[in-house]
Image (cartoon, grey):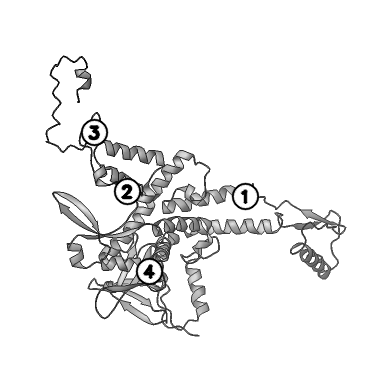
């Protein structure tokens, strides 16, 4: 099978100097060329497609994508009334309905799981905006970021080059594409952190493979044989090969816990063996987790390293993770959707798209209640605002559910500012010794 023009630089962090389109290559040749392009010093090729062999990358992608996929996403309208800004949900807006059901084969949760995974690994997320003959966007059709090339024409227009599932080459305009991306060296296509730290990822994968090989061999190192002093050795190469092959047949497959008797004149040489402690195997794996997590800005406890974690700092690190990692990725999606999915009239009318991060930004129950209580006493929230924050049913307005405290902590009440205080009851002396005690405040 022969392939048409293939750009071997697609999906790379930046075009390589002198790279040209390859014509007439077989699939095997293309794969070999691409593997060589991204091969690491550790001896394996690392790309955003195969980086999930790294346990740390799996932990990072899982932590970010699961959180974003569970966030409610809302289409809101910013309005101003009485000098105060408000945000009103727009559940019947066409974009709200689109995001609730992005396409025919993905529900909203699956869509954001996949979208976040691609954005984290590739630094880019692409969707074709499928429209009917008239009217709004009907579906969002995800594209493989590795099959999308972004280039800029001499007139500054941006072109997206990709291929359809049937293999047909297409050129699309920004009007047809939803493109969410991270930082980009060329200001066009987001940079992939995976490409930038592929050596660190490759070292972690190779360290894991080394451990698997060692434990797969009953945690025994490779064995080197030597002739004892004064031994003449084997008479010919055939006898030597017969001994080596016989040893491998027994111990490389089914030789666990099998006794061995070496021929006369043969000794085991362990001088070249390196145990895991001397190789700093555990420390190497722990350090690689830290390096990879730091490149993505993820706290190390999120990738399974609890060596320096305590009850208090893990909670704070989790909040930092939401603020410094999840929120930036959410903003990448929000800005891309506002630019690509909303019309100019929508933007002029104050329509915005927001993920609701309140649920994952909440602290522990005690701290949360203390904070809400401070706002309640200061007159910032009402009882129903508090209850709504805790997903509780509201109190009837007649029972004071919507009232705000407008007086100081020593005399809270719902009396509107400027109104006259209640008239005190007449306490004129009537000769009753209990008059003062019966007087109403």
Name the residue that disc number 1 marks. 279
User: Secondary structure beneath disc 4?
Assistant: loop
Q: Earlier in the sequence, mark 3 or mark 2?
A: 2
Tell me which numbered mark, 3 or 4, is placed earlier along the sequence. 4
* Neighbour tally class for label 4: few under 14, some 14-19, many 20 plus, Cα within 10 Å: some
Is any atom of residue 381 visible in this view? Answer: no
Mark 1 lies on a secondary structure that is: loop
Pick the residue in front: 342 or 278. 342
Mark 4, residue position: 15
Earlier sequence position, callout 4 versus callout 2 = 4
* Residue 414 picture location, percent across and down: 20, 38
Local crowd size for mark 2, using a 10 Å CA cut-off: few (<14), some (14–19), many (≥20): few
From the viewer's perspective, tell me whether residue 395 is left or right of residue 59: left
For the point 50% across and 55% down, the residue is: 56
Real-space Cα distance between discs 3 and 2?
A: 21 Å
Q: Nearer the viewer, mark 4 or mark 2?
A: 2
Front tag of 2 and 1: 2
Any part of residue 101 in sight: yes
């Amino acid at each position: 099978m022969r392939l048409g023009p293939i750009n071997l630089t697609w999906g790379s962090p930046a075009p390589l100097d002198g790279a040209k389109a390859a014509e007439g290559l077989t699939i095997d040749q293309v794969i070999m060329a691409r593997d060589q392009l991204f091969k690491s010093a550790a001896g394996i090729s690392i790309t955003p497609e195969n980086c999930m062999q790294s346990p740390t990358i799996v932990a990072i992608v899982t932590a970010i994508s699961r959180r974003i996929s569970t966030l409610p996403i809302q289409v809101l309208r910013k309005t101003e009334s009485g000098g105060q800004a408000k945000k009103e949900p727009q559940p019947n807006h066409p974009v709200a309905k689109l995001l609730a059901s992005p396409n025919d084969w993905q529900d909203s949760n699956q869509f954001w799981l996949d979208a976040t995974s691609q954005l984290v690994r590739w630094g880019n997320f692409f969707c074709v905006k499928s429209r009917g003959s008239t009217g709004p966007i009907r579906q969002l059709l995800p594209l493989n970021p590795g099959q999308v090339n972004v280039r800029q024409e001499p007139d500054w227009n941006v072109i997206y080059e990709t291929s359809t599932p049937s293999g047909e080459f297409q050129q699309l305009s920004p009007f047809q594409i939803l493109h969410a991306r991270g930082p980009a060296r060329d200001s066009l296509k987001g940079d992939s952190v995976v490409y930038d730290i592929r050596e660190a990822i490759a070292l972690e994968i190779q360290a894991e493979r080394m451990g698997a090989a060692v434990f797969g061999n009953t945690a025994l190192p490779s064995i080197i044989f030597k002739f004892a002093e004064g031994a003449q050795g084997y008479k010919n190469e055939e006898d030597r090969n017969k001994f080596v092959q016989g040893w491998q047949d027994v111990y490389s497959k089914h030789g666990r816990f099998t006794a061995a008797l070496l021929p006369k004149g043969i000794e085991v040489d362990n001088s070249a063996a390196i145990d895991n402690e001397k190789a700093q195997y555990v420390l190497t794996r722990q350090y690689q987790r830290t390096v990879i997590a730091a490149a993505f800005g993820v706290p190390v406890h999120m990738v399974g390293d609890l060596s320096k974690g305590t009850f208090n700092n893990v909670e704070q690190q989790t909040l930092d993770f939401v603020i410094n990692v999840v929120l930036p990725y959410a903003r990448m999606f929000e800005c891309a959707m506002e630019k690509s999915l909303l019309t100019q009239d929508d933007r002029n009318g104050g329509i915005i798209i927001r993920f609701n991060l309140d649920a994952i930004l909440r602290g522990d129950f005690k701290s949360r209640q203390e904070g809400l209580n401070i706002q309640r006493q200061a007159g910032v929230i009402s009882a129903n605002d508090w209850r709504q924050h805790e997903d509780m049913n509201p109190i009837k307005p007649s029972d004071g559910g919507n009232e705000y405290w407008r007086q100081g902590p020593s005399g809270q009440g719902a009396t509107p500012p400027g109104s006259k205080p209640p008239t005190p009851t007449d306490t004129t002396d009537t000769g009753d010794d209990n008059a003062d005690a019966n007087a109403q405040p």
